[in-house]
Image: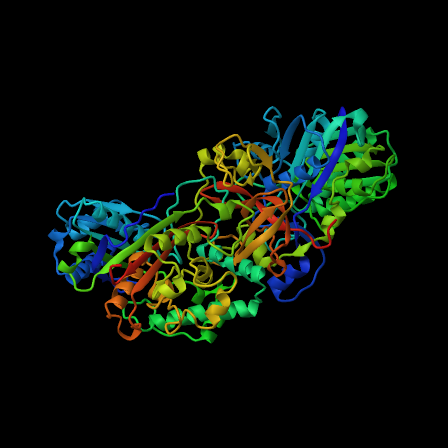
Amino acid sequence: MNAGIVAYAAYLPRHRLTASDVAAARTGTPGGRGERRVAAFDEDALTMAVEAGRLVRRLGGTPASVVVSTTNPPYAGKNNASAAHAALALPDDVPAYDLGGSYRSVPGLLGTAAPGTLLLAADVTVGRPGGTDELDRGDAAAAVLLGPAEQAAVRVVERATVTEEFLDHWRAPGTPFANQWEERFAVERYLPLLDRVLARLTTASVDHVVISSPGPRTARTAAKRLAPYGPVRDLAGVGHAGAADPLVRLAATLDRAEPGQTILLLVLADGCDALVLRCTDRLPAARATPTVDRQLAAARPVRYLDYLAWRGLLDRAGPRRPDPAVASGPASARNSRWKFGLAASRCGSCDAVQAPPQRVCVRCGAVDGATPVPLSEAGASIRTFSVDRLAFSLNPPVVATVVDFDGGGRLEMELADPDPDRLRVGGRVRMVFRRRHASGGVHNYAWKASLEEETGD
Amino acid sequence: MTSRGLRDRVAIVGMGCTRFGERWESSAGDLLVDAATECLASAGVTGPDVDAYWLGTMDSGYAGLTLSTALKTDYRPVTRVENLCATGSEAFRNACYAVASGAYDVVMAVGVEKLKDSGFSGLVRRDPPDDGSAVESSAPAAFSYLVPAYAAAYGVDDATMREVLTHIAVKNHANGALNPRAQFRTPVSAETVNRAPLVAGALGVYDCSGVADGAAAALIVRAEDAHRYTDRPLYVKALAVASGRGDGALDDRVSFTSFPEVVRCAQDAYRQAGVTDPRNQISLAEVHDCFTPTELVLMEDLGFSERGQAWRDVLDGAFDRTGRLPVNVDGGLKAFGHPVGASGLRMLLECWLQMRGEAGRRQLDNPTLGLTHNLGGRPGKCVSFIGIVGSELS
């Protein structure tokens, strides 16, 4: 990599599934250890990639290009990165591409991407219900903005890699479940690869070792082998987050690292990649908030049956209502800045903000001449609300609100990750990018409002 | 704005209305035939006497053909109109204009809706394709927005709000119980209302109007011709419609404690009719109680209560059948049911029956001026209709 990291962020969906809750649901008796992160019913790899990208974008700077990597793309054939580009409201001359769809994509991209690349990695990963890996996998996203080495907060000191073909983990396209061979086989294959990579490095000691492997036994065995290099930083509570996993773990370690410290990042997936990184004085300014630890602390439980329904593994009875309409391609294209970028209009005559954008001002009647005003980073207050038990939702009830934006403008919005007990007139919300539903194979992405955490950052 | 109105220029001389309800046995065409036939008979005329028709339906058939093929009208003009839940009133309004213009002598306004063939709960509309960005909140949710907004604006606590909404539901069900055409004919207790399953926000099942099939019709002639058909015609005093700009949905200065469309519509209607003191001049009001908080807010928007005071007036029984201004004496949308295209005409039916002394056990003491209020859309973005009819020429 001839570039370094100038900004980074991880996004963890708010919900967590615990081994104890799964055991309680399956056997009637709670017990067991471990937990994973779970994307809400209205999150997918794209929405989480956007959320991670937003965290990095708040640190400033405009990327020269965007790449999105996931093993679980919402669309095949269609470039998912274009929707991320729209949601991040990037200029149209900033290219955006889907690149890579394996657990090994991120080390490849880190090694080859040009300065200015905004790398977004996100995944929703599903193990078979009742399988050993149901809780070993996790959902998360991460974003890194690459820049010239001299501006980097994290520089690459050296890199080594080996590639090898063997079948230890895989997923057939069109099926939800990840598969793995007996993991003792994987361990036996990976350890020699690890040794070969380590032999190619000149570095013998670092301040932090970060291991990303889809196999927990592989990761544990590798950790023992790597102990002489430095303390191995585990990340409990997330699970292996697919394509995003190396970056999520790196982000968690960077959150705690200090300028001058070094990190050995090892990715064990269909080969072995090692990156030795050094943090510079710019590290504190490259750190997005909230940190990984803070997001881990903000976890909220999800019931196992809800989790199964969210992943489409349980078909639940809903209200007697028609299925939602397919979002129209031409209408979505006309309104792309609004639908994906939440850009309202500001009247050129009286400055009234209107959402969605209006050609004729509702206050002064001026026709045209309005300018776009982005609301995605604006705060807002709830003007009124309703828990809607009749509306269609994959996760009823819908919580519908009318919100007034701080800089003006009003919009009816659905609440994401709602907590009905905290609903009140005047409650504070921020904007989040979600997938409202998929109808007829078409994903309907939409901005929702999310209640601010009462304890704030 | 110029709005001259039609005060005393046209009259209703016949009406018909089916029983509202889950009419599994009847098609939209059947309901049209029933309502139109009763309407013709009440005026002592036959089909060929009718020069033109206005058909109101939101979603139960396209074009005037829905009516002409059911009734086998003799190549008469039929105009199909739609204005969401105010559709029936819109058919009536435009039919009145046709007579007032002199283009026709005898016209019929008919409204129909067949909702219960869809298999869905609540109202279902065939909306045009869009970008999918708008929240798909249900109608009860949209109207339940009024509750927290009203409570916060006027400092009414949750328990009192519940009591107010329950009073409205109990009142309208009690009225509907006296109405042989109503969908729900069993009085409900406050306890039943309060314990009902929640639908949206504070609204339980008994805060929501009945989803019904039904049809209603009115025969309209010039005022000077009215006594050829009946001794007791109803004269049209005002017809007002205000179509909203979406202020409430867009403008953060607008509250969710009022329908600006209704306020503007009422100003126009009262001016047309020469009504200066609605609380005392109007004998009865049929208002759009699609959900209980709608009726609460309408009492203020229509000038029946001071701002922020309707909740007290409701609790005091001001709008009960025996109160100072009876509201929804026929049971309203709440208990009579809400077959969308028919509802506006159904409201007129109660004015017709009451002012002719034909309202049976619901009969009020000598009413002379009736108001119908019909609303299409939802808080923030709606169309409001107000009609005023009277038993005497002024």
Residue B173 shows in the view: yes
Q: In the displayed structure, does residue A187 sit left or right of residue B338?
A: right
Considering depth in this image, is B295 or B56 the residue closer to the camera?
A: B295
| Count of numbered labels shown in the rendering | 0
Residue A166 shows in the view: no
Rendering colour mode: rainbow
Task: Give coordinates of residue B282: x percent, y percent.
Answer: 35, 64
Task: Give coordinates of residue A46: x percent, y percent.
Answer: 59, 39
Considering depth in this image, is A110 or A257 the residue closer to the camera?
A: A257
Image quadrant in which you'd find residue B232: bottom left
Task: Give coordinates of residue B392: x percent, y percent.
Answer: 25, 62
Considering depth in this image, is B180 or B349 the residue closer to the camera?
A: B349
Considering depth in this image, is B99 or A38 the residue closer to the camera?
A: B99
Task: Give coordinates of residue B367: x percent, y percent.
Answer: 30, 68
Position of B228 relative to B243 (above/below): below
Image quadrant in which you'd find residue B327: bottom left
Q: In the displayed structure, does residue A65 sit left or right of residue B20?
A: right
Position of A78 relative to B188 (above/below): above
Position of B327 relative to A408 (above/below): below
Q: Quadrant of the N terminus of chain A?
A: top right
